Amino acid sequence: MREDMDKVIVERPRGGWRVQGDGRKWRNSKDRGSHLGMKRGHAHPKWLSENLAPLKRWLHKQVHRPWDKVYAELCSGIDRRSTVQAHIFEHIDGFVERRAELRDGQVWGPAERWRSRLRTLLSEAAHVELFVHPVTGILLPNRRLHEARKAQKLAYRAAWSRPPAGKAPVFHVIDEVTQWHRIDGCWFEVTLAPLPELRRTMLDVTYYDVLRRCPVTRRGGCEKPAFGSADHREMYGRDHVYASAMRRLSQWEVRKRFG
């Protein structure tokens, strides 16, 4: 490790400045927002600005080494008696997972960065880049990190794009082909169309359901809808129909009907 690592990490000007007096210096600067409250700028503090990138790169270069030796080398280059330099050690747990456990031949770690009581497989921990093996004490990289982050990204997308499981859609029947559906607090007018009956010699025709955002067929139904249920009766109250068109209703139309 380079001898001036402590200076590279710590000795960098802090962001912001302590405004004295009435705060007009900051309120008239380019850093202020377009809309300011009466108290903004009178106590504009500084914030920490450690350059942790060199420390992270150095730790990644120490993989496959005993963690005790890596930590000893780190302590020799950074003086823990200094309050400023000792603050660097608080960031080590953000780069290296030192609380890994071995269960049934697999390594487990915290499920989340700030909640250490919940445990999960290290291959599913998207925040763990480096970890100390609980048996050998060797600093190792998380080789399943890319897969874990990809799975986490897909889970976030699914959570935001689909409603909770088991939640029935809220809708009102207007007439035979028109329904009002409530989606995320907004009302939409949905026009239904029947799925034509098929003869034995006919091929199954695919239609697109604009509300559930998925293709539908008479035989196969709706597979993997982005919204609502795959069951036609649960979604629209009857079988063999799909949403052929939809439009968002105005507040005036909603108030006119529901009061």
Image (cartoon, grey):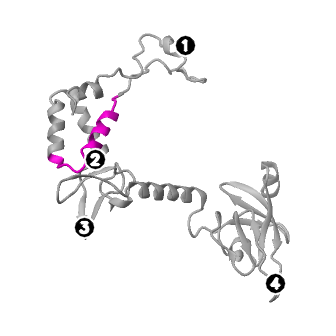
Distance from label 2 to label 1 (Cα)?
A: 43 Å
Please tell me how crowded label 3 is: few (under 14), some (14-19), or many (20+) other residues with Cα within 10 Å.
few
Disc on res. 96: 2
SS under mark 4: loop
Check disc 1 and give the amino acid type. Asn
- Cα separation, mark 4 vs mark 2, equals 61 Å
Q: Which residues are magenta?
A: 50-68
**Residue at numbered disc 3:** 103
In the drawing, does residue 120 fall left or right of residue 38? left
Q: Residue at x 22, y 56 (%)?
A: 133
> Which SS class for mark 3?
strand
Q: Amino acid at mark 2?
A: Val
Q: Which residue is mark 4?
A: 202
Quarter occupied by residue 256: bottom right
The residue singled out by tag 1 in the image is 28
Q: Nearer the viewer, residue 119 or 63?
A: 63
